[in-house]
Image (tube, grey):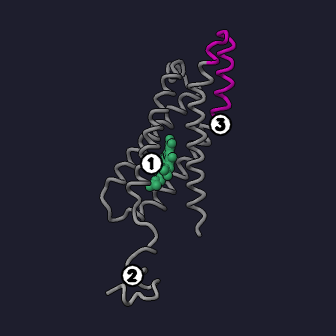
Amino acid sequence: MDMIPILSRWTHIGTAIVLVGGTCFLRFVLAPAAAQLPEAEHAKLKELVMKKWKMFVHVGIVLFIVSGFYNYLVVQVPKHRGQGGLYHALMGTKILLAFAIFFLASALVGRSKSFDAMRKNAKFWQSIMILMAAAIVGISGYVKVALPGNSAPAVTASTLNHASPDSSTTAK
Ligand code: HEM
């Protein structure tokens, strides 16, 4: 059995769990709790948390891109060759949404002055990212279940005939 597709899928889904779960925690648990602190402590806590979270965001983006493009170009494209374009249209939409999230996540953990206004409004942008991630997970699950492509050629009529001891009768 080829372990690389399994490892790649494990990496991809594991990264989604950590990054989407972490963003939900920041938005709905840590941010409201930290908002109760005095202003200076709140600002310090935010700075320290974002400094740590930044590493997760940067490593996660790399893991998403490497495992995602491997899953797409090496594993899925051959399975969907010769089929309609719906699979690729949905995957294209998903990839665009993913890159928009990568941009927002990088801006929120970054230090560039150009994105100060976004960082001041972090709760709003985290909510947008969570909604976009929900759409991405929905699209990913839909293509997996409804548009699975061609799996291993083990179930073609000719291989069934070869596998069955009375294939000469069933084939007629
Ligand atoms: C925010 C970023 C992303 C999230 C949250 C995400 C999430 C997921 C999840 C949860 C699955 C598993 C779906 C299932 O098996 O039910 C999946 C599958 C997949 N993802 Fe991503 N993904 C992201 C980015 C990307 C990127 C950038 C690519 C690059 C091409 C990509 C390519 C794929 C492919 C090819 C599959 C397999 C689809 C299939 O089974 O046909 N993903 N993704």
Q: Residue under label 3, please give it.
A: 55
Q: Position of residue 137 (x, y in %)?
A: 47, 43
Cβ atoms at labels 3 and 1 below 8 Å apart: no
Q: Residue under label 1, please give it.
A: 140
Dot 1 alpha-carbon crowd within 10 angstroms: few under 14, some 14 to 19, many 20 or more: some
Give the distance between the C-alpha atoms of the residues marked 2 and 1, in whole angstroms: 32 Å
Toward the viewer: 163 or 8? 163
Q: Which residues are magenta?
A: 33-54
Left or right relative to 75: residue 157:
left
Which residue appears at 67% of the width and 26% of the height? Answer: 49
Q: Secondary structure at mark 1?
A: helix
Q: Secondary structure at mark 2?
A: helix
Toward the viewer: 153 or 125? 153
Magenta span contains residue 5: no
Magenta span contains residue 35: yes
Which residue appears at 63% of the width and 38% of the height? Answer: 56
Q: Residue under label 2, please give it.
A: 158
Tell me the kind of residue under disc 3: Met
Which of discs 3 and 2 lies nearer the camera? The answer is: 2
Whether the residue carrying mark 2 lies under 8 Å from ligand 1 is answered with no
Indicate the quadrant containing the C terminus: top left, top right, bottom left or bottom right. Answer: bottom left
Tell me the kind of residue under disc 1: Ser
